[in-house]
Amino acid sequence: MKTDRKTFSDCKGNPFQVTVLTVGGKRPGPVFTIISGQHGMEHSGPCFLPELAEELDQLDFEGTVHVCPCANPGALAMDYEFYPEREDLSLIKDYYYSRFRHDYSPWGIGRKDMNTDYNMNRLWNKTGKGIAYDITGWLWKNYVDQADLTLDIHCAQNSRPFIFNDFPKNNPLIAVTGIEITIPHFNKKDDYNAGNLGFQSARRDDHYGFCIEFSIQHGLKDHEYPIGKNAVKNLMIKMGMLKAQPVLGPHPTYSLPEVQTEENATSLRASHFGHVRYFVEDCVPVKKGTLLYEVRDIQTLEVLERGTAPFDGIIWSKTHKPLTEPGERLFSFYQPTELKAEF
Ligand SMILES: [Zn+2]
């Protein structure tokens, strides 16, 4: 295994090292680049990728795998989405993360406030001033530009891992990951959002790239690490880099509808205030009419409402809130299509 370390400095001269591990196969073949840790509160990729590189180093495969687990060490050290090098970093001491005020930024530059160019995953293939630009520029030139497949690893706030995909051509690769859900975003992006790594890596002919979102921010869910390692190994099998038996999930990868209509996509909303109880897990197919949830009054303990499946489909993205508000979204419900894994 080869280790490449480069030191970058922020605008105040503080140095940060970024490390890329390269595992070379026994024979030439495809180039597969994996990057994580762009957003500092997303720790799954940074934690499992060094282990994965060590495991790959023991395998007999073709081609080259580049792994950059911690692309944004300044942000990871702060457990914050980005590294705002020009701001007063001492304000982070007054910041505590709560999923009930997810968008709060101590500098007033969070996602709801503005499009900041501190956000590393909006800067790919762009030039500008700052350590995040310097790191993405270096990674692109040395590791992404030549990659046949680029995998960008993040974490969202969800119950299970899923995929963001910007191009239909990635679907045969996504189908072998064993990840349960892929969300297609095939529409044209504005310039800011077009700076994400999945989009930039895959927009070129004969290059592929997408993003796996693991399911916890500001925390660890180490039982998901095997899911990530398995996805990478299955992708290597699919690309002809590795000869092994792929391990797939309990069901095909579901693709949420690209074109959403009342018949295939809806949000279920509560009509009352109370405690919510869900009866169905995310991604489990249910028939129309299946009981999905009920809301119970916290004083009388009466059940105030029940909700059933409006069509055959799956629940996706339940709210984390224990108490419902009238009119508030509880979860989305989709009729997905299935991506068939073919090797
Ligand atoms: Zn992220």
Image (cartoon, rainbow, N blue to C red):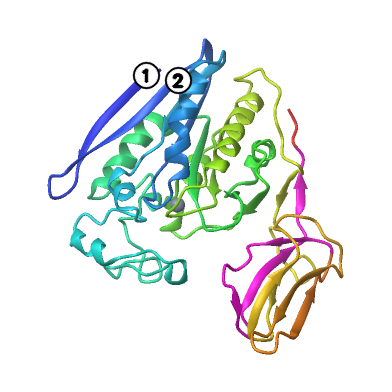
Residue 333: x and y in percent read: 72, 66
Above-or-below relation of 26 to 295: above
Above-or-below relation of 170 to 334: above
The amino acid pointed to by label 2 is Val
Q: Is residue 43 magenta?
A: no
- Give the number of the disc on residue 2: 1
* Relative to 245, 89 lies left or right: left
Q: Residues within 10 Å of mark 2 (few under 14, many from 20)?
A: many
Which residue position holds label 2?
A: 23
- Which residue is found at the position 52% from the left and 47% from the top? 221
Residue 335 visible in this rendered orientation of the protein = yes
- Give the number of the disc on residue 296: none
In the rendered structure, which disc, 1 or 2, sits on the residue that comes first in sequence? Answer: 1
* Relative to 82, 270 lies left or right: right
Q: Tag 2's secondary structure? A: strand
Q: Is residue 316 magenta?
A: yes
Residue 191: x and y in percent read: 42, 58
Considering depth in this image, is 284 or 128 the residue closer to the camera? Answer: 284
Residue 226: x and y in percent read: 58, 35
* Relative to 337, 22 lies left or right: left
- Magenta segment range? 312-340
The amino acid pointed to by label 1 is Lys
